[in-house]
Amino acid sequence: MIDNIKIMNLDFNPEFILNNYKWKVVNFDHDEISELNFKKGWQTNITNKSRMFSLRMLLTENLKAKTYTLSINGSIRKWYFDKNSRKDLNYFEFVDCIEILGGKLGLKKGEIWTKFKVTKLEIGITLLLKSFNNDILNCFVKYRNAERDDKNCTTVYFKFNNYILKIYDKYLEIMQKQQTDLNKNIINKFLFFRFEISIKKISGTSFNKNYNELSLLKSNWNMFPNELKKYLGNIKFVDTISKEKTITEKISYNDFIKWKIYSEMKSNGIYRTIMDFNEKVLPNNKSKYFNDLMDNYKSFVASEKDYKAIILLELEKKTNRLYNKGNIRYIAI
């Protein structure tokens, strides 16, 4: 479930890594030197099985303290599996991955867990949804206090100050990066639904308490499914893909007004409607009025399935499978 990560040690003994890696000198500008007291830095990549998926390693020297700071960042999931796939790390794969990394830094078994802080973190999961297509992404329309961004046609973002929620089609992402033609049979039958919580600065978020040290990621691993379920579940979902209910009889004036509002929302788009609502409507009872507006829209949609419930159920199944493979029930909390 952990993908991208950045870990840091502010007082690292660099002897082993300086002697075992080829480094490129990193030059800092004068302002950066005076502010951070760095004389110079070195940069290299840590490979696991191939050069294609590597982790970036940056070593910097502090002039005053005569200490070295080591930071490592990248996708440990891709680094461990040596490919960009929909496969997610289970607990034991994560532990094995970090132990391999520790060995490449010249550390003894188990030593890496107590030496590194976590400064950035991305947790995510890929769900294989049958009979879905990526139009479902547009149904995720709002998260409280977040800025929604769908400028990238394959991804929907909900942006906060220090973290981002991302929903996208993993298969499309893989094919675009590989510059490979899409398989229409896959697109027509499946959606590789990817949901991620990307924490840009962990110290400035509510995640800090549970995940700001590498050892805490291991001991709190069983919290990740609830984090994913909570944040995905809290995104406002409106079914924009099901067909409109057919009105065959005369309706009352009040129902006509409701239908007219629905038609306008459908014509303008749900997200445009939400933007207008946020801009124009007074704050008093705003949440209630917003829910009334969404309920009005839903009342004219002939929803064949509860799509969000299906997605959340698949999320639960996938996390359970990852836990069973990792024997998570035997891990001490």
Image (spheres, rainbow, N blue to C red):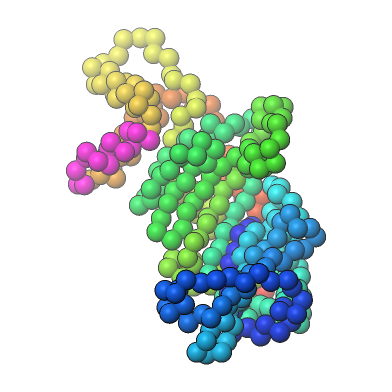
Give me the residue at 47% from left, 54% from top.
Answer: 164
Out of 175 and 90, give the one closest to the viewer: 175
Image check: 195 left or right of 96? left
Give me the residue at 29% from left, 20% from top.
Answer: 260
Q: Is residue 273 magenta?
A: yes
Out of 23 and 104, give the one closest to the viewer: 23
Q: Residue furthest top?
A: 249
Give me the residue at 47% from left, 35% from top.
Answer: 139
Residue 25 placement: quadrant: bottom right
Q: Overall secondary structure of the magenta stretch?
A: helix
Residue 24 placement: quadrant: bottom right
- Whole-percent x and y of residue 302? 47, 23
- Whole-percent x and y of residue 214? 61, 73
Give me the residue at 52% from left, 57% from top.
Answer: 198
Q: What are the residue bounds of the magenta stretch?
A: 271-284
Out of 329 and 174, give the one closest to the viewer: 174
Q: Is residue 56 magenta?
A: no
- Whether residue 280 is visible to the viewer of this picture, yes or no, is yes
- Whether residue 208 is visible to the viewer of this picture, yes or no, is no
Q: Is residue 133 above or below residue 194?
A: above
Image check: 84 left or right of 199? right
